[in-house]
Amino acid sequence: MTEHAMTWGIAGLTAMGVVVRPFRWPEAIWAVFGALLLLAFRLLGHHDALAGVAKGGDVYLFLIGMMLLSELARREGLFDWIASIAIAYAQGSPRRLFVLVYLVGVIVTVFLSNDATAVVLTPAVYAACRTARVKDPMPYLLICAFIANAASFVLPISNPANLVIFAGGDMPPLSRWLSTFMLPSIISIVATFLCLYWTQRRALAEDTLAADTQQPPLSRSARLAGWGILLTAIVLITASAMHVDLGVPTFVAGTITTAIVLMLTRQSPAETMKGISWSVLPLVAGLFVIVESLDHTGLTNILSDQLAALASASQSQAIGVAGLLVGVICNLVNNLPAGLLAGSVVQAAGVSDKIAGAVLIGVDLGPNLSVTGSLATILWLSALRREGLHIGAWTFLKLGTVVMFPALILSLGSLLLF
């Protein structure tokens, strides 16, 4: 029991380190440090630690492919070109630009995943704000963070956590997925928009957009990068329909597109590689090791028994409790490893589709509470830091409380309607 307590203690301290970032050290340092502590105290064997790292293999490949495409598109000016189009359609209205960015965020999240929204859309939105000379770009950038999670359960490919949850289990066919999640997704997207717009209404009212912006030319390399992103979207949808893991196709698409563009422009890959947030990979690996250690304490069995008992007593109560509890917990340990644990619990408990759906909604939407709740939000933070911008954990938490809970409660409630 003492070993179990130590494991839980290290997991808790690791989560705190990732959230608070003492000494302003990157999140990855604390995740890796927590994993090393588990090995140092022999609370987890080397083979089990490697098994935990290996469980994230598909996620690593997926992220590398997406980050390659994003950095390539940024360097070749694709985002500046997209930004000029967004500003033209906004016609000088900050509110119209806010709505336009939100709609684009929904499309990118649904068809390219929430991580793509954080990695690909965030630089484009910042470029649009810079071009339009807005006073404060944060209201528009916040869209990228919140819609990345709010729209992430429309399709199985909309969030890598969806695939993690069903690892080792049967992924529902698309028709059953849509019948379960379409209404909750619509409610999540609309509720998140209304709450986020309400929090940013004053900043938008005081803002102005430049009317004399010019559309930059679209270079051949930028066009190729754009086609690479579109091709990746098609590949992801096809792979999902065929029940193929998304990591390898995304990695191959990103690598091939990058190689072609760099060869045509005769550029060294060094600068592109330098612009990628590689620290995300050890962060994810460390978190997977933490979850592997928690699984060895018997936590999965304990939670599955509790969920099964709650479901047998009342399905509606199980939907509400499981969804809200998982949603909050994801902000403590990050939703990818939490999704891995939650998926094991759901499969072991053998609960209904609606209860399993509530858990998935909690994993996908719950992370909108904090800056470290989802990998997408951490990637969003990295994109902001690269542009010299910053938002504090406490500031985001206050905003997330207002935006996340109404969307989560309403989405979970819609599961009971049909």
Image (cartoon, rainbow, N blue to C red):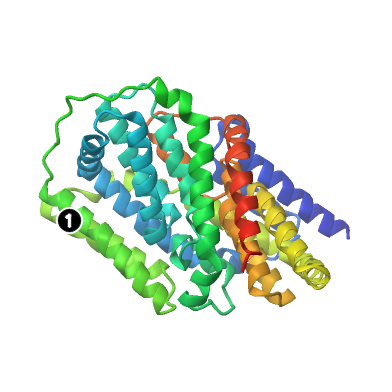
Query: In the visual, does 373 lie left or right of 142?
Result: right
Query: In the visual, does 394 lie left or right of 137?
Result: right
Residues 418 and 273: in front is 418
Residues 415 and 342: in front is 415
Q: Amino acid at mark 1?
A: Leu
Residue displayed at 27% across by 43% down: 74
Residues 330 and 258: in front is 330
Q: In the image, residue 377 lies at what x, y percent?
A: 50, 45
Q: In the image, residue 28 lies at what x, y percent?
A: 55, 46
Residue displayed at 39% across by 44% down: 102
Is 94 located above or below residue 105 in the figure? above
Q: Give the residue at the far front of this rendering.
A: 417
Residue 29 in view here: no
Q: In the image, residue 217 lies at what x, y percent?
A: 11, 40
Is 327 located above or below residue 416 in the figure? above
Count of all numbered marks drawn on residues in the image: 1
- In terms of secondary structure, where does tag 1 sit? helix
Question: Pointer 1: what residue?
Answer: 224
Q: In the image, residue 167 lies at what x, y percent?
A: 56, 73
Query: In the visual, does 46 lie left or right of 199?
Result: right
- The image quarter containing residue 203 is top left
- The image quarter containing residue 342 is bottom right
